[in-house]
Image: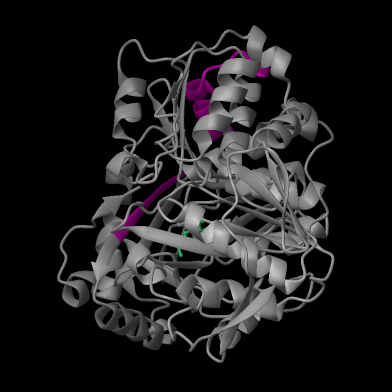
Amino acid sequence: MIRDYPTTPFTDQKPGTSGLRKKVKVFQQPNYAENFVQSVFDVIDGKQGATLVIGGDGRFLNREVIQVAIRIAAAAGFARAIVGRGGILSTPAASNLIRIRGALGGLVLSASHNPGGPDEDFGIKYNIANGGPAPEKVTEALHARTLTIDRWRAVEADDIDLDALGEVKVGEMIVEIVDPVADYAALMEKLFDFPAIRAANLTMAFDAMSAVTGPYAHDILENRLGFAPGTVRNGTPLPDFGGHHPDPNLVHAHELYETMMAPDAPDFGAASDGDGDRNLIIGRHRFVTPSDSLAMLAANAHLAPGYKDGLKGIARSMPTSAAADRVAAKLGIPAYETPTGWKFFGNLLDAGMATICGEESAGTGSDHVREKDGLWAVLLWLNILAATGKSVDTIAREHWAAYGRNYYARHDYEGVESDRADTLMAELRRKLATLPGERFGDLEVETADDFAYHDPTDGSVSRNQGVRVLFVGGSRVVFRLSGTGTSGATLRVYLERFEADAIDGDTTDMLADIVAAADAIAGIVRHTGRTEPDVVT
Ligand code: G16
């Protein structure tokens, strides 16, 4: 039986860069998750008889929201829900399932790299039939619906056993509990040369950060590729990620970094985030920035079976360094610059205009799914190491020698009062027109703008995507506010300097004058009261 539950709107359900992310306590308010899930279903067509994928990264509240979503989906007319066993599906695995099972879409429950637990973060994202995050026209309609919703509707049924593989019925809808790993691992075996990776006898440390990648990494790295037991660390997903931030950067994965910088470091080190779509790559004694990793993967992708015919194009988000553009130019293929947010790559991938995409925020992926994919990046690196017999350090140094080096860092100022952050950005935007020609030390501003993206596939325009200040000679600084935080504002300052020949510099030294220029231009200290960033990646 279907029952209507009267409700009233919440005014704070506008999806951010990647879905709705809030504190668990916010999601625990009566009707909060229900309103959002119902609003998703209210704005999408074609639910009758369709298939829906549901899964999450195992964080606190994952199972409860899945049970509710199943009952609402059954009332909305879906014929089948495919759910990962234990409520577990990594974001790329969910994207793959949506695609191979011909689903209408999927609900991915995660707050990604944000911490989990009763006092931390939760999130819900809707992905469309191509397996990718809903584009802005869908999220805008969804937001509008959350502001008018007056009822949600669910089948009256008990919770189901999320841990038992097989099928059960909820109302008229079949719920199919599937192994979360099997289909994804099979896809990876098709793209990469597993026998060659096995035969290369590489050593590795992989930190799953007590998040969703654990079961995937155990199966793929240890079982299928034969890496030694213990290669995967923190491999059991925990509701609170062991009390840590499942954020694969040098701050939160510092133990891995120390392992990789030690005299007896393994050949390769990697980590993944809460929902398995981000990656951190560290070779023995060599950290690779996400922007460089994108460029190096693109330059060498043809060594893996899945990409042996070459790439159609490379796409990167605007704040990501231009290193990948140089690879595209050499390969004679197009390079695309999109706003931050994986959703903007979907159209390019669907249209066959790009094969590989990447972001400075530790995301890389390809047209095999419509999400960034942490383990995919790890496996492509392993495939390249196996095919070339070279170390990460050698590959990086040879790359810079051939293409030049884009020194790069991101400075994050977290938990800034929203008003102060907004004032900083507004002031910056007002002075854009007068910046060109101004000098900051040795740097002269060439152009300055607020990035707007014109999607070449559907003509849609996305404005106000971040302020770029480009200096004569190819250096630049970008300012934008994060769209994934859950408290206050996070100011991100992206710093980049290109050197054609000086490839052995220290990143901090190479960026020092740009850091000073960034403060002079934006008044970071004046507006935020902070003299140092909270996180440097
Ligand atoms: C999400 C998006 C990414 C984006 C990142 C950071 O990643 O999918 O495209 O680059 O957030 O966004 P922001 O700078 O607005 O915080 P994830 O891994 O959090 O889903």
- Relative to 2, is 253 on the left or the right? left
Residue 133 x/y as whole percent: 64, 62
The answer to which of 245 and 394 lies nearer the viewer is 245
Residue 131 lies, with reference to residue 524, above or below; the image says: above
Residue 40 x/y as whole percent: 64, 74
Residue 1 lies, with reference to residue 396, above or below; the image says: below
Determine the residue positioned at 50% across, 52% down.
63
- Relative to 367, is 323 on the left or the right? left
Question: How many numbered circles are shown?
Answer: 0
Q: Name which quarter of the figure residue 327 lies in.
A: top right
**Highlighted magenta segment, given as a residue range:** 386-412
Residue 417 lies, with reference to residue 126, above or below; the image says: below
Please say whether residue 399 is one of the residues in the magenta stretch: yes
Which quadrant: the N terminus?
A: bottom right
- Relative to 206, is 339 on the left or the right? right
Determine the residue positioned at 51% across, 60% down.
65
The answer to which of 360 and 38 lies nearer the viewer is 38
**Colour scheme of the rendered structure:** one colour
Residue 106 lies, with reference to residue 362, above or below; the image says: below
The answer to which of 105 and 370 lies nearer the viewer is 105
Determine the residue positioned at 79% across, 57% down.
103
Q: Is residue 317 visible?
A: no
Determine the residue positioned at 50% across, 32% down.
214
Residue 210 x/y as whole percent: 40, 36
The answer to which of 2 and 63 lies nearer the viewer is 2
Q: Is residue 210 visible?
A: yes
